[in-house]
């Protein structure tokens, strides 16, 4: 018999850049209450903000048709903790797991803003998975950590 603790949270939010701060606060509150270390909270929050900004900025008119859906799933088993943050949006199909990352500029003069967020999501999550069904994008952002025993 395994000893697994699981928790869930769900949020529907209007698709608006003005709502990103409120969504971020919702995420941080739940993840902190579930005992996640500060670096895990920060990693998830960074990934969420980037995913929301991408969906709302590049999703086209269809992203505004239905609310954004956010799901948080937490599981703990022995010394392993896992949080999966799922974002569903009605925007144009876009798979950040397959998108090409823009190469870094050679100099500050050659640099242009934007384009590095997908790489940030990839490096701050332990796994990213994308699915498209029922005309919706679904991005799963997974972060794990181990309990530090004294």
Image (tube, rainbow, N blue to C red):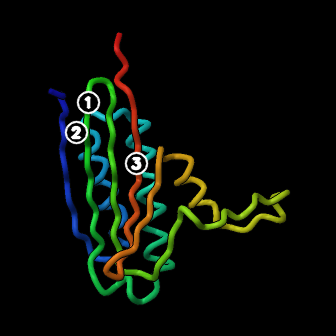
Residue at 38%, 27% in the rendered image: 146
In-front residue for pair 135/44: 135
Q: Secondary structure at mark 1?
A: strand
* Tag shown at residue 142: 3
Instruction: Name the side, left or right, on which 85 lies relative to 114.
Output: left
Q: Earlier in the sequence, mark 3 or mark 2?
A: 2
Viewer-closest of 15 and 146: 146
Place residue 104 in its image quadrant: bottom right
Mark 3–mark 1 distance (CA, rounded to whole Å):
15 Å
> For the point 40% across and 63% down, which residue is it?
139
Position of residue 77 in the picture relative to residue 93 (left or right): left
Residue 10, image x and y in percent?
A: 20, 59
Residue 16 shows in this picture: no
**Mark 1 nearby-residue class (10 Å; few <14, some 14–19, many ≥20):** few
Residue pointed to by mark 2:
33
Q: CA distance from mark 1 to mark 2?
A: 17 Å
The quadrant the N terminus occupies is top left
């Amino acid at each position: 018999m395994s000893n697994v603790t699981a928790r869930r949270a769900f949020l529907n939010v209007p698709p608006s850049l003005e709502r990103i701060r409120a969504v971020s606060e919702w995420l941080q509150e739940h993840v902190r209450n579930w005992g996640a270390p500060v670096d895990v909270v920060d990693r998830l929050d960074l990934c969420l903000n980037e995913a929301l900004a991408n969906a709302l900025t590049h999703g086209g008119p269809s992203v505004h048709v239905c609310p954004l859906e956010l799901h948080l799933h937490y599981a703990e088993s022995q010394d392993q903790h896992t949080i999966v943050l799922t974002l569903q949006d009605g925007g144009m199909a876009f798979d950040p797991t397959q998108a090409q990352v823009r190469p870094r500029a050679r100099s500050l003069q050659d640099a242009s803003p934007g384009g590095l967020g997908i790489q940030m999501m990839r490096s701050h999550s332990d796994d990213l998975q994308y699915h498209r069904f029922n005309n919706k994008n679904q991005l799963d952002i997974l972060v794990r950590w181990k309990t530090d025993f004294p």
